Amino acid sequence: MEKQKLISSTDVGAKGCDWVRLKKLEYIDHLGRRRTWEMAERTTRKGPIDGVAIVASLVGDKPKLVLVSQYRPPTNAETLEFPAGLIDDGESAAEAALRELKEETGYVGSVISVSPIVFSDPGLTNANMKYVTVACPLSENQNPVPQQEDNECITVHIVEKKNLLQNILKLAKQNNFEIDARLYGFALNSSL
């Protein structure tokens, strides 16, 4: 069995696109054969990490998660997902998570953990992220006010962690939401 490796990466265009470009890759497969692959590459990366997904837990009597929904043009639907965002130049994953959480939801908290880099859809793109777990004390989050940008229209949802999978499925059905795979995987794992 041969070591699989990338041989070349060629831009094939994304005329008029600001955030992505398309590439054709050539690589050697496990049998030593030369193969091709097509991919989308994010052009906004400022360092080794594109963005963060924030697992924000409300700390109180009943454990709850802070989730968001927003319209996503690629799916032509509103999706239910973790708060998330891109990392700004010079910013750590933890700093980006706290900034994005405040902007999108108004909630504040402290970082509990930061995951290693994970890839969102490795068969299509090199886009990557880190999960950042944030504890949000109820005492500091009585009346959170989002600070969304003009191009954002994000709705905040507070969902009990107990029976999380059933809770997000119910919320999605009631509101005709699609569910982001990262959130669904997290909820599925919590139900096992």
Image (tube, rainbow, N blue to C red):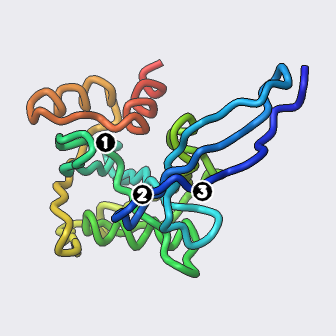
Amino acid tagged 3: Val
Q: 41 or 184, which lies in front? A: 41
Q: Residue furthest bottom?
A: 90
User: Which residue was labeled with disc 2?
Assistant: 14
Picture residue at 14% right of the left edge, 27% below the top = 173
Is 144 located above or below residue 89 in the figure? above
- From the viewer's perspective, tell me whether residue 15 is left or right of residue 50: left
Image spot of residue 189 (x, y percent): 48, 26
Q: Residues within 10 Å of mark 1 (few under 14, many from 20)?
A: few
Q: Quadrant of the N terminus?
A: top right
Amino acid tagged 1: Lys
Q: Residues within 10 Å of mark 3 (few under 14, many from 20)?
A: some
Q: Residues within 10 Å of mark 2 (few under 14, many from 20)?
A: few
Do the residues bearing badges 3 and 1 touch, measured as CB atoms within 8 Å?
A: no
- From the viewer's perspective, tell me whether residue 29 is left or right of residue 83: right
- From the viewer's perspective, tell me whether residue 14 is left or right of residue 74: right
- Nearer the observer: mark 1 or 2; the answer is 2
The label shown at residue 62 is: 1
Picture residue at 43% right of the left edge, 69% below the top = 98
Residue 133 visible here: no
User: Which residue was labeled with disc 3?
Assistant: 114
Image spot of residue 29 (x, y percent): 78, 27
Q: Earlier in the sequence, mark 3 or mark 1?
A: 1
Amino acid tagged 2: Ala
Q: Earlier in the sequence, mark 1 or mark 2?
A: 2
Residue 148 visible here: yes
